[in-house]
Image (tube, rainbow, N blue to C red):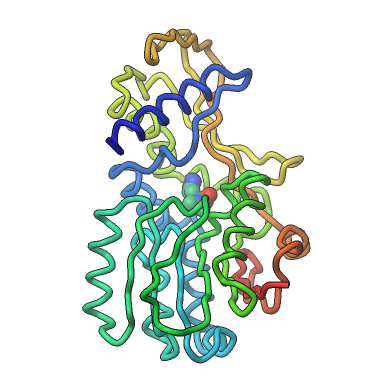
Amino acid sequence: MTKVKERKSMRDEVLHGLTGPQKSLPSKYFYDERGSKLFDEITELEEYYPTRTERDILKQNVEEIGCHLGDEVILIEPGSGSSDKTRILLKGLNNIAGYIPIDISGDYLFSVASELQKAFPEITIEPLQADYTHSIDLPDSLPEGRKVVFFPGSTIGNFKRDTVDRFLSVVADIVGREGAFLIGVDLKKEVEVLLAAYNDSKGVTAAFNKNILRHINRELGTDFDPDLFDHKAIWNEEENRIEMHLVCKEDHEVEVNGTCITFREGECIHTENSHKYTLEEFGEIVSPWFEVKKVWTDEKDWFSLQYLEPK
Ligand code: AVI
């Protein structure tokens, strides 16, 4: 039943995106099994600085982060995936009473959670399968503690402004008056550095971008040929974001659920936004809900980890 519902909404979203004036596809469809593996490969690339930079910031400041979080912490991580960066906190801190990883993909979530429970038996680990962009009902059986949402990776950069606002209000709701928010935010920097990060020399980001078409083919039975598209990543100065596109190499048509979509040579499908902020801009965005209390950065000021408290 659930699967049928998911398929219908994917079909609707794909059709909606491909029949608008600017063709687009939702970036969440990068992430099937192959897409998640390609993303993991991206995070290991020399040019893709965010992951290793954020990891280093966490490692170098773990004690100070712990002091800000308080004595008995319930760590809540929306979109937890492999919980990779969280391990740095779980290992380095002794004030985490509970950890709630939240992810839409259940199998992976539950297997990561049970592995973590073995590694950290003293921490109550309660995985929650949910779409975190909407409101989240936390389990009743949580230990006492201060609720802290952890959202690393600068995933917030992939959200459009209305989604950012909705997400911030969901987080404010979850943590309540006494809680806190620890978030990774990628910062503005030289355009060459940004372009290299999204146009890597090994072509992994290109494969990741084109994978969205393979994923849609498999789920919806469409016949997109990924080889008829080139990867393109550009810096949009006005919108302060990297944009990823798929550029059509020759005129052709693809049928999506009975609707014929025409592609012209040179036409683009917009597949992802990755916004970059200054510290001031980000402080302004969160200001209706949160106050930025502490910011940790790397020595080049490329990436920030920010500790926020509700207003
Ligand atoms: C998941 N997200 C923060 C990545 C980013 O940098 O915007 C996704 C990504 N797209 C291309 N490379 C990485």
Q: Foreground residue, 149 or 261?
A: 149
| Image point (36%, 61%), residue name | 128
| Marker count (numbered) | 0
Relative placement, left or right, of 192 versus 90 is: right
Q: Relative to 122, does residue 242 appear above or below in the rendering?
A: above
The spot of residue 184 in percent (x, y) is 56, 65
Q: Relative to 255, does residue 269 appear above or below in the rendering?
A: below
Q: Foreground residue, 262 or 99?
A: 99
Q: In the rendered image, which quarter contains the C terminus?
A: bottom right
The spot of residue 169 in percent (x, y) is 63, 58
Residue extending furthest front?
140
The spot of residue 214 in percent (x, y) is 33, 29
Q: In the rendered image, which quarter contains the N terminus?
A: top left
| Quarter of the view holding residue 35 | top left
| Image point (49%, 35%), residue name | 26
The spot of residue 246 in percent (x, y) is 50, 27
| Image point (58%, 54%), residue name | 156
